[in-house]
Image: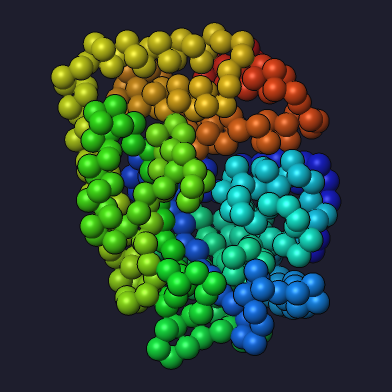
Amino acid sequence: MSQTGFSRFNQWSHWMEGKGLESDIVLSSRIRLARNLRQLPFPHRLDESQAETTLARLEETLQAIHDRWHLDFYRLAEVSPLERQVLVEKHLVSPQLVQEPVRYQAVAIDPRESISIMINEEDHLRLQVVLPALSLQEAWHVANRVDDALEEHLDFAFDQKWGYLTACPTNLGTGMRASVMVHLPALVLMRQVAQVFTTLSQLGMVARGLYGEGTDALGNIFQISNQVSLGLSEEEFLHNLSVVAQQVVGSERHARQHLAREAGVRLADRVARAYGILTHARILSSDEALRLLSEVKLGADLGIVPALSRASFAQLAVLTQPGFLQLKAGRALNPLERDELRAKLIREQLLGEAA
């Protein structure tokens, strides 16, 4: 199952397609399950022999279910640093998993890059399913089936009172974190996003940046998830997050309508300037590109500029990242070369032709 090659991750992931329920605001839905093997210390307490035993046991298990789930196994020590960076940029692994040293870390990924299993991160195994738009129930259905398949071969640490045992107490219980990735430019422009997130915290939810805990909300993209996984069933957590997601979508739509009504000319000018820069600039940093793309996406949703037809906003958000750019180029690039290629590819995507 292991694969090699500089461009093995040089493709769009299924979750980026930009179609589905509330897809103009909700970019993706994710279910993540934390699991640990019974009678083995948590990853941060494993000695070298135990770490290798864990890795080998999980690789053997993934081989056993390969015919059903087609999960290809990659030991991160055999994956280049650039490819590891791309895995983070595509939200297939966490930044924590790819931190050096990676001798006993691994990931298994299905062909559509909807399912990924991180091995020896904070927990022995972290299974995640990411699907486009607002599709929490569908993601949970897939994650639950993969979890059942794994449990046919593995003895997970479980307590009748506390549920699944995890390295971090906030993951006790179901071991589940459900999240939606949302694009909220209007709430940010109207300076209402902090108030929305304060309300979320009162409902047991938390908002984080583009790549999760401890990261910034680049391009006005946020991840909203449940704060704890103990005390409710998986279905109850999913219902609560679905309700919250719909409320956030409603707030963003209301903010967009207000902006279009009260600041129509100023908003149109702002969007047009962003579109003009993106279609004419010769160098663009990743932060600037994502900020401007966010404004153009808002303008496209409101009919101010042409719709993003060649690539979804989620695809463009990944395309702007340093690692993915270099993987597309097929070689390492210095910062200026990355900025030049980024500007060129964005022009091509927005103008629909080679630029």
> From what the image shows, is residue 139 above or below residue 195?
below
Is residue 246 in sight in this rendering? no
Image label count: 0
At horizontal 79% and vertical 72% (from top left) the residue drawn is 48
Residue lying at the far bottom of the rendered structure? 160
Give the image location of residue 303, x and y in percent: 31, 22
Quadrant in the picture for the N terminus: bottom right
Q: What residue is drawn where x is 58% and y is 22%?
A: 285
Q: Which quadrant holds residue 241?
A: bottom left
Q: Position of residue 341 (x, y in %)?
A: 67, 20
Quarter of the figure that contains the C terminus: top right
Quick check: 143 above or below 182? below
Q: Residue 29's quadrant in the figure?
A: bottom left
Residue drawn at x 71%, y 74% is 46
Residue 213, can we see it?
A: yes
Q: Nearer the viewer, residue 121 or 9?
A: 121
Pick the residue in front: 297 or 112. Answer: 297
- Front residue of this view, candidates 4 and 126: 126
Judging depth in this view, the residue of 72 and 289 nearest the camera is 289
Left or right of 290 in this view: 11:
right
* Way the structure is coloured: rainbow
Which residue is painted at 30% across and 71% down in the image? 236
Left or right of 7 on screen, residue 278: left
Residue 340 in the image: x percent, y percent? 66, 16
Viewed as shown, does residue 172 lie left or right of 331?
left
- Residue 107 drawn at (x, y percent): 69, 60
